[in-house]
Image (cartoon, grey):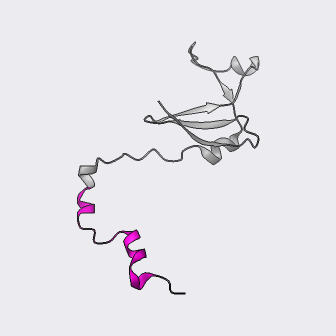
């Protein structure tokens, strides 16, 4: 699956960074691995396959999705919206009376 870069708070290309895993509703978080034993002992229900990373709150405030991803509509369900078009935006811009005159 393809990763889509969402954003970073790092100015030098270093972590932390958020990525969306395209085709899913999952976000991949890149950050420094949490190694503080005092923190790790407080984590609940940790599976062997899980790891924890530390990122600044600002990363999530700025880039984390605020709404669920919209459900994409199959084209046949919206095709009727395109059948009656007389002009496209490009067509309107190139019509003689819409052109800017010098």
Placement of the C terminus among the 4 image quadrants: bottom right
From this view, report whether residue 21 is shown above or below residue 47. below
Query: Residue 62 appears at what percent x and percent y?
Result: 64, 48
Stretch of the chain drawn in magenta: 79-99
> 4 left or right of 94?
right
From this view, report whether residue 93 is shown above or below residue 45. below
- Magenta includes 84? yes
From this view, report whether residue 69 is shown above or below residue 26. below
| Residue drawn at 61 percent across, 32 percent down | 29
> 8 left or right of 22?
right
Query: Residue 8 appears at what percent x and percent y?
Result: 67, 42
Query: Going by the picture, which residue comes out furthest to the front?
Result: 102
- Magenta includes 41? no
Q: Quadrant of residue 45?
A: top right
| Residue drawn at 38 percent across, 79 percent down | 95
> 99 left or right of 41?
left
Give the overall secondary structure of the magenta segment: helix
Q: Quadrant of residue 85?
A: bottom left
Q: Quadrant of residue 16?
A: top right
How many numbered circles are shown?
0
């Amino acid at each position: 699956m393809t990763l889509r870069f969402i954003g970073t708070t790092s100015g030098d290309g270093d972590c932390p960074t958020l990525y969306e895993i395209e085709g899913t509703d999952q976000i991949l978080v890149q950050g420094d691995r949490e190694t503080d034993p005092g923190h790790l002992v407080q984590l609940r229900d940790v599976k062997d396959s899980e790891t924890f990373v530390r990122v600044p709150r600002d990363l999530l405030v700025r880039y984390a999705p605020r709404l669920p991803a919209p459900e994409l509509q199959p084209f046949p369900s919206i095709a009727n919206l395109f059948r009656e078009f007389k002009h496209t935006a490009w067509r309107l811009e190139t019509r003689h009376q819409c052109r800017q005159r010098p």
